[in-house]
Image: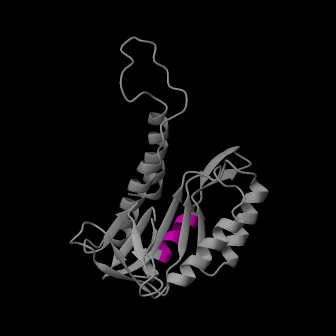
Amino acid sequence: MTEQEFIDKINMKYAEAKKLFETDAKYNIKRGTAHSVSGYVEDIFSLYMAERLDNPNNFYLVDKLISLRFSKNGKATTFKPDLAIIQNQCLTHYYDLKTNLGWNRELDKYLRQKDAFIQKIKGRKGWVYFEKENRPEIVFSTELKYQMVVFSGWNINQDLLAKNIELASSLDNVDLHILNIWDKKENSLSMDKSAFDCLHKEIQELV
């Protein structure tokens, strides 16, 4: 799957999301708010990244709870990446996928909390719960980062977006990737090839 094919698939899903999943059967059923496409974005992004690594022995966990304890008898802490990649029992990649940044335009506090959390779990052991008798132990890579991948950078003031990007670049354990940026000349969204290149480079560095 190419970068453009990835973008096109999501754009097509956005178009479908505006329609009813079932026929209106001539009852004048009209949909207002579009269906959420976030689950689809998680799935297609996971496939896209899996194809980049091309290793059938890896685990690509989509929206799956992961746990650890910070002390022997302490309460388990759980978190749920939109995509976590596990290679040889090591969690090497943690992705958080957003369709846009309209949900939280001021990312300062959010990203700083993620930065601190990643710093705290790096090198520690945890586990993934599949079922009662299947809870494999994992270790969190010492090179782990929180990577926010944003499909579209349009639903936010562009100066504020630049501020958020600058903040993310200043944090040791955070990366922010905006896959589509606003082209002022064309007055439309345009794929940011450099964001994809960064994703490709980063995923290969931890193989």
Q: Quadrant of residue 87?
A: bottom left
Residue sitting nearer the eye, 75 or 186: 75
In the displayed structure image, the side of residue 42 where residue 32 appears, left or right: right
Q: Examine the rendering and report whether any part of residue 51 can be seen.
A: no
Q: Which residues are magenta?
A: 194-202
Is 198 drawn above or below residue 13 in the view shown? below
- Residue farthest to the top, as pictured: 26
Decide whether the magenta segment is chiefly helix, strand or loop. Answer: helix
In the figure, residue 58 lies in which quadrant? bottom left
| Residue 198 belongs to magenta span | yes
Name which residue lies at 38% across and 68% down.
52
Residue 112 spot, x, y in % from top left: 66, 73
Residue 182 located within the stretch drawn in magenta: no
Q: For this rendering, which residue is in front, 121 or 175?
A: 121
Against 165, residue 183 (above or below) is above
Colour approach in the figure: one colour
Quadrant location of the C terminus in the rendered image: bottom left
Q: Image point 74% across, 49% down: which residue? A: 184
Side of 12 where 61 appears, left or right: left
- Check the picture and name the quadrant holding the N terminus: bottom left
The vertical placement of 182 against 96, above or below, is above
Q: Please state the horizontal and vertical placement of residue 34, each as a whole percent of the image.
A: 51, 34
Instruction: Name the residue rendered at 47%, 58% in the picture.
Output: 3
Residue 117 location in percent, x, y?
56, 77
- The residue nearer to you, when weighing 71 against 116, is 71
